[in-house]
Image: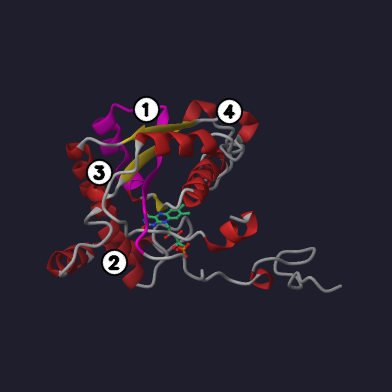
Amino acid sequence: MDLIDALRTTGAARNFHPGVVSDEVLHRLLDTARFAPSGGNRQGWRVIVVKDPEAREALRDIYLTGWYEYLAMVASGLVPWAPFTDRDAEAVAITRAHEFAELAAAAPEPGFAESLHQAPALLLILADLSALAAVDRDLPRYTLAGGASIYPFIWSLLLAARAEGLGGVMTTMPVRREDDVRALFGIPENVAVASLVALGRPIAAPRRLKRDPVGSFAWLDRYQGPAFSADE
Ligand SMILES: Cc1cc2nc3c(=O)[nH]c(=O)nc-3n(C[C@H](O)[C@H](O)[C@H](O)COP(=O)(O)O)c2cc1C
């Protein structure tokens, strides 16, 4: 598949045909993803392939706590957990999380979150914090540069999966309960939970992705200057 086509059409897949993804395929995906860039080429990603049914169910339960809070915040018009946000409004919204849990319980079919434990493959992606060049570590704001050494690995994994006719989604909901995830898998304190990736053979064909145009986020010479365009 053409690289540009893959970049423009690889969306999140959350509904999969039943059946596991073989270890051989998973190994091949990881073997390709490991060529992702990282600060200083420190390669701080760590991966747990989660097969144990009890651990999978525990991860699903951990996921669901954050998921219902997420839905409650979205319903209140918030960007969930945005570093810049109205924390009071967020706290009020979260009190309604149980309503979304009840709605999900009454739904005729379980959603992606409720059936997460049944995903054909689940990969827990971790970050060894002692291997991250987090250049913004000492700034008086929320830090994000460290994650840039991990998430490209996940994106490479998803693109490699696409090349195999697979699809998936990077999720971050389990990060909300990182300590519980650490306890579940024996993860040491210097290692953070970056993502839980679900993979499988997608039921739906790739669809047209909705993204904002370049002119809405790229400017010439200054922040919110003239929209950057291809024309002189
Ligand atoms: C950092 C990050 C965190 C995400 N967390 C979740 C998540 O917890 N659960 C989930 O279902 N999707 C998650 N996603 C997937 C996004 O919802 C998805 O990329 C976005 O909605 C665009 O979807 P599309 O590519 O299918 O258009 C995450 C994506 C990123 C990049």
What's drawn in magenta, residue-wise? 174-203
Pointer 3 residue: 59
Quadrant location, the N terminus = bottom right
Query: For this view, does 73 lie left or right of residue 215?
Result: left
Amino acid type at mark 1: Glu
Q: Earlier in the sequence, mark 2 or mark 3?
A: 3
Which mark lies nearer to you, 2 or 4? 4
Q: Residue at x 64, y 30 (%)?
A: 40
- Residue 26: percent from the left, percent from the top? 41, 38
> Where is ligand 1, by quadrant?
bottom left
Distance from disc 4 to disc 1, alpha carbons, whole Å, reads 19 Å
Q: Is the residue at mark 1 in contact range of ligand 1, meaning its CB lies under 8 Å from it?
A: no
Pointer 1 residue: 189
Residue 206 forms part of the magenta stretch: no
Q: Earlier in the sequence, mark 2 or mark 4?
A: 4
Which mark lies nearer to you, 3 or 1? 3
Q: Is residue 49 above or below residue 164?
A: above
Query: For this view, does 25 lie left or right of residue 57?
Result: right
Query: For this view, does 173 lie left or right of residue 209?
Result: left
Distance from disc 2 to disc 4, alpha carbons, whole Å, reads 38 Å
Pointer 2 residue: 72
Nearer the observer, 107 or 200:
200
Mark 4: give few (<14), some (14-19) or many (20+) Cα within 10 Å: some
- Residue 73: percent from the left, percent from the top? 33, 66
Pointer 4 residue: 42
Marks 2 and 4 close (CB-CB < 8 Å): no
Q: Is residue 81 above or below residue 46?
A: below
Distance from disc 3 to disc 1, alpha carbons, whole Å, reads 19 Å
- Residue 68: percent from the left, percent from the top? 26, 60
Marks 3 and 1 close (CB-CB < 8 Å): no
